[in-house]
Amino acid sequence: MAKKKIGLPPLDWLRVFEAAGRLGGFSAAAREFGLTQAAVSQRIGNLEAWLGRSLFVREARGVSLTVEGESYLPLVQESLQALERNTEDLFGKSPQELRVAGLSSNIHALVLPGLARFQETRPNVRVMTDSVARRSSLDEERTWLQIRYGRGAWPGRDAALIAREVLVPMAAPGVKWGVPLIELRGERPAWRDWARKTGHGEMPPSQISFDSMEHAISAARQGIGVVLGSVPLASADLQAGRLCRLDLPDLQTKDGYWLTWPEERVKSKKQRALIADFLQALQG
């Protein structure tokens, strides 16, 4: 290796090194930058000559990082990411679009009521929503900002609480306790859990069963029965008087509705500020 030079090597060499280290090869880095493999190899060779150290071991089956390369790679990645973030903060344009995905019921109950507040704060931002049929579909959803139900822990994702889940016996005006109970199947606590935790006796079997809180609340709104309904999802109906809380104990849960995004996706201050404003609008 040539004698180590003083100062910083060219940014182009560092970016190619980062890609080759992250992707595990010169060919993959060449595809990412639209270069030939020879051009990638030359840039990395120049970087190694500049540093006076070998960063990759060249073998017949491919390349692998040396000990020095493994130590240098995270430093280069952190520096490039910091440069990108700071450049965006200083010179980037303010975000002009916010796109959020979630179950249709969550979009309807949690996003729509906060849109007017958000537009007052961000009048130039276009809001777009993407509805998914099932919670499991969110893992394959391309829209990175999502509303999820759970306890706020998803691998690789940051999360901010919109509202805690609270379950309350509710029904249409005039409907009394004792009419058919509406059963909801799924991960939420059911009538038997409510009875056990609130000290009520044996619960009668339900003849009406749904797998969607949205459908269960709609059935209660039509006077079909009493539902152990979600306060956040039924908020508009409760405020408008289409549903009434019965004079019975509520059930606090450990779950909630969260605004979530990939950890590595929100890099700049402007993006973080946009999400903070959106979250505040949803929280009311």
Image: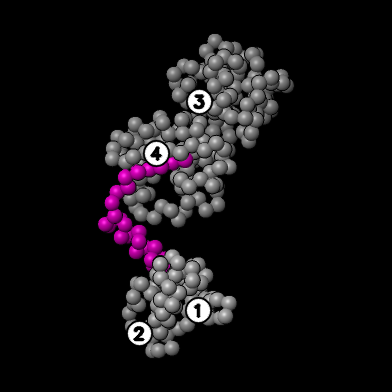
**Is residue 100 found inside the magenta-colored segment of the image?**
yes
Labels 1 and 3: the sequence-earlier one: 1
Question: In the picture shown, does residue 174 fall above or below 240?
Answer: above
Q: Position of residue 254 (x, y in %)?
A: 58, 38
Labels 3 and 4: the sequence-earlier one: 4
Image quadrant assignment for residue 31? bottom left
Residue at numbered disc 3: 234
Closer to us: 281 or 35: 35
Magenta region: which residues?
75-101
Left/right placement of residue 274 relative to residue 261 reads left
> How many other residues sit within 10 Å of disc 2, few (<14), some (14-19) or many (≥20)?
few
Q: Position of residue 128 (x, y in %)?
A: 39, 39
**Is residue 153 found inside the magenta-colored segment of the image?**
no
CA distance separating discs 2 and 1: 19 Å
Q: Position of residue 57 (x, y in %)?
A: 53, 80
> Can residue 249 be seen at all in this image of the molecule?
no
Element carrying mark 2: loop
CA distance separating discs 1 and 4: 45 Å
Element carrying mark 1: strand
Residue 176 is tagged as none
Residue 56 is tagged as 1
Labels 4 and 2: the sequence-earlier one: 2
Residue at numbered disc 2: 5
Labels 2 and 1: the sequence-earlier one: 2
Residue 128 is tagged as 4
Residue type indicated by callout 1: Phe
Residue type indicated by callout 2: Lys
